Image (cartoon, rainbow, N blue to C red):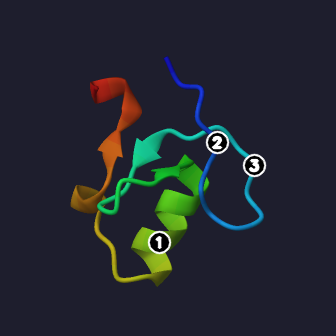
Amino acid sequence: MKTETCAYIHCEKEADFIDAMGDFVCEECMEREVQHGGDSYDDFQSIGDL
């Protein structure tokens, strides 16, 4: 069950993924990191897969 809040600064959305560092992130922040950062989709694990 998802209950974590996104760890990214100024984001208070519910987290959907865990990044490579173990931080909880929402889908919007994950997409932004993949599109504009150095991360790939493989760097994120869906919370639903746990």
Sequence-wise first label, 2 or 1: 2
**Amino acid marked by disc 3:** Glu
**Amino acid marked by disc 2:** Thr
Which residue lies under the disc numbered 3? Answer: 12
**Amino acid marked by disc 1:** Glu
Residue at 32% x, 53% y: name it.
44
| Residue with the most extreme top position | 1
Q: Is residue 46 above or below residue 11?
A: above
Nearest-to-viewer mark from 1 and 3:
3
Which residue lies under the disc numbered 1? Answer: 33
Q: SS at mark 2? A: loop
Give the Cα distance between marks 2 and 3: 6 Å
Q: Is residue 4 above or below residue 27?
A: above
Check if mark 2's residue and mark 3's residue have beta carbons within 8 Å. yes
Quarter of the image with the C terminus in it: top left
Q: SS at mark 3? A: loop
Q: SS at mark 1? A: helix
Which residue lies under the disc numbered 2? Answer: 5
- Using the image as rendered, state which of residue 32 and residue 15 is in the foreground: 15
Residue at 36% x, 53% y: name it.
22
Q: Quadrant of residue 5?
A: top right
Graded by Cα atoms within 10 Å as few (under 14), some (14 to 19) or many (20 or more), the crowding at tag 2 reads some
